[in-house]
Amino acid sequence: MESLVAKIVWPRILLGFVIAPLVVPICYFVYTAITERNQGASEFVGTLVNYGAYAYLFALVLGLPAFWLVRRNGYTGLWTYALAAGVIGLVGSGLMSLIGLKVAGVLVGTVSGVVAGIVFYLIAFL
């Protein structure tokens, strides 16, 4: 029986790490579009730059070690990656709350982490 380790395609893993963190600023933009008045495209670019930088930072600092840990322990399911990314989103947005992010932003960060984990799994393993 083939294991998932044999099925790993490294370019897809790399593509997952490049694309999945973009989910975070998109989720924050959608949240502000629903709850507040936003300025359209210019605000989208600002959200993408501001939240995207932090999303990539947390993906690098927390996401890569989490990926290696999950992979090493043999957990290969979609919900494992979603849960791990949700925890990373919670930690990241929790740290951001220390510098002024609202509590609702922490919830959005956690949910966007879960969605980013699902996107990562879909890109990397399907």
Image (cartoon, rainbow, N blue to C red):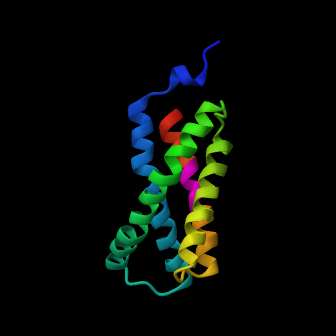
Drawn side of residue 38 relative to residue 49, left or right: right
Q: Is residue 113 above or below residue 64?
A: below
Drawn side of residue 22 relative to residue 118, left or right: left
Span shown in magenta: 112-117
Residue 125 placement (x, y as % from top left): 53, 33
Q: Nearer the viewer, residue 100 or 112?
A: 100
Picture quadrant of residue 74 = top right
Residue 79 placement (x, y as % from top left): 68, 44
The answer to whether residue 126 of the structure is visible from this angle is no
Q: Residue at image x 59%, y 57%?
A: 88
Q: Main secondary structure of the magenta part?
A: helix
Q: Residue at image x 67%, y 34%?
A: 75
Question: In this view, which residue lies farthest toward the top?
Answer: 1
* Residue 2 lies in the magenta stretch: no
Residue 82 placement (x, y as % from top left): 63, 49
Drawn side of residue 73 relative to residue 38, left or right: right
* Residue 113 lies in the magenta stretch: yes
The image shows a total of numbered marks equal to: 0
The answer to whether residue 47 of the structure is visible from this angle is yes
Q: Is residue 19 above or below residue 11?
A: below
Q: Residue at image x 48%, y 40%?
A: 123
Q: Quadrant of the N terminus?
A: top right
Q: Nearer the viewer, residue 104 or 95?
A: 95
Q: Nearer the viewer, residue 29 or 59?
A: 59
Q: Is residue 9 above or below residue 122?
A: above
Residue 44 placement (x, y as % from top left): 37, 73
